[in-house]
Every structure is written in structure tokens, then in C-alpha cells.
Image (tube, rainbow, N blue to C red):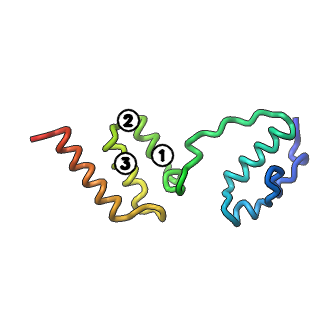
Amino acid sequence: MFSASDINPTICELCGKSYYDHIGTFCSLEEYERHLRETITVKWGEKPQAESALNKQVGGNHYKECKIQPIQLIEANKLNFLEGCVVKRLCRHDKATGKGRQDIEKSIHELQLLLELRYPE
């Protein structure tokens, strides 16, 4: 077993970046923590816990910031494609990486499609 004194918590031993470099450049705290876990694995042979796909997001962090991620709500309620699209757009429209009015308009269009396809008059 290792102790906290066995590694320098301010330097990533895999890439050599400091904690500040990870946060100050394009690396996140999650990336820094992942590097530390990998360092522990490489150095001491301990197996890290598998990282959940819910902790990763490609192209922003607007879903990760939600109290319940849209995919969790979509899967738990067995929503179909159009319903899931609406949930995702509504969760991101007002975030920095969202598309504001366009997300709302697309949600309305998807709801109109849902009405037309599932509940024709």
C-alpha cells in the first residue's frame, strides 16, 4: 500500500504538469485526478476503479453540471428518441455551451413531431 507522502500531489508524475498547469491550461481537475490514479497504478500496481462514462463529456460540461444528467433521466424513464432530444435541449439551452433560443425552437419542433407521429388527428 502507498501513502500520500509517496507522491507529490502538486505534480502529475505521468505528464509532469503541475496542478496549476492542469487547471490553468486545457486540463481539468478530473484529468489531474485521473493522472494521479494512473500514476498510482503504474508505480504501485494497484488497480484504479473504472471511471464512469457519466464523469466524462465530449464537447463541454453542460450535462455534467446538471443535478441529474439528462441521460440518467432519459434511461430511467425509458424515453424515446424525440423525448430524449427535448430533455437534452431543455437542460442545456441556458448554459454557456447551449444554443439558447435555437435549443428551445428545436424542442418545440420535436414536440410537434411527437404529436404528429404518435397522436395523429
Q: Is residue 63 left or right of residue 36?
A: left
**Which residue, given by chain and number where applicable, does mark 3 sit on?**
87
Q: Mark 1 points at which residue?
A: 68
Disc 2 to disc 3, C-alpha distance: 11 Å
Q: Depth check: give the residue in front, 12 or 65.
A: 12
Q: Where is residue 121 in the image (x, y as percent from the top left)?
A: 9, 41
Element type where label 3 sits in the image: helix
| Residue 116 as seen in the image, left or right of residue 12 | left
How packed mark 2 is, by other alpha carbons closer than 10 Å (few <14, some 14-19, many 20 or more), is few
Circle 2 residue:
77
Residue occupying image coordinates x 35% and y 59% = 103
Q: Tell how many labels.
A: 3
Alpha carbon separation for disc pair 1 and 2: 13 Å
Q: How far apart are marks 1 and 3 (CA)?
A: 11 Å
**Residue 21 placed where, x, y %?**
75, 63
User: Residue 110: percent from the left, percent from the top?
Assistant: 27, 50
